[in-house]
Amino acid sequence: MNYREIMRRRFILGSTQPQVILARIQENIEALRQSSLPYQISFSTGIVQCDPSSDLTLSDYLALADKQMYEQKKGR
C-alpha cells in the first residue's frame, strides 16, 4: 500500500460523514457541559472538501482547515 492510499484510508471521509461525526461530538460535549465538571469544554473544527482537479497542495488544504477552525473559535 502506498502513501496516498494510507492517507486516503485514514483521513478521507464521505461528503456526509463530517456532519454526522461533528453532530455526535457536539452532543457529547453538550452532555459534559450539563454535568458538574469544574471546567468548560469546547470543540472547534476546520473541515475542507478537497477537489482532486485543484492545484491546491495538502499544505494549502491544511491551511484552509486551520483558518476555518480559528474563525470558529473567534465566533464563540
Image (cartoon, helix red, strand yellow):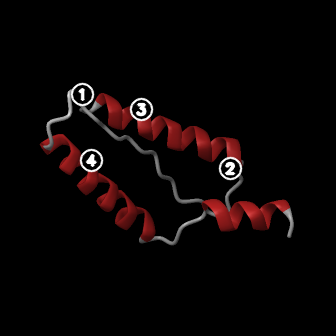
Does the rendering let one see residue 43?
yes
**Residue under label 1:** 39
C-alpha separation, residue under disc 2 versus residue under disc 3: 20 Å
Secondary structure of residue under mark 3? helix
**Residue under label 2:** 56
Q: Nearer the viewer, mark 1 or mark 4?
A: 1
Q: Residues within 10 Å of mark 4 (few under 14, many from 20)?
A: some
Q: Upstream in the sequence, badge 1 or badge 4?
A: 4
C-alpha separation, residue under disc 4 versus residue under disc 2: 33 Å
Does the rendering let one see residue 52?
no
C-alpha separation, residue under disc 1 versus residue under disc 4: 12 Å
**Residue under label 3:** 70
Q: Upstream in the sequence, badge 4 or badge 2?
A: 4
Label 1 amino acid?
Answer: Tyr
Is residue 50 or residue 53 the one in the foreground? 50
Q: Upstream in the sequence, badge 2 or badge 3?
A: 2
Q: Nearer the viewer, mark 4 or mark 2?
A: 4
**Residue under label 4:** 29
C-alpha separation, residue under disc 1 versus residue under disc 3: 21 Å
Q: Nearer the viewer, mark 4 or mark 3?
A: 4
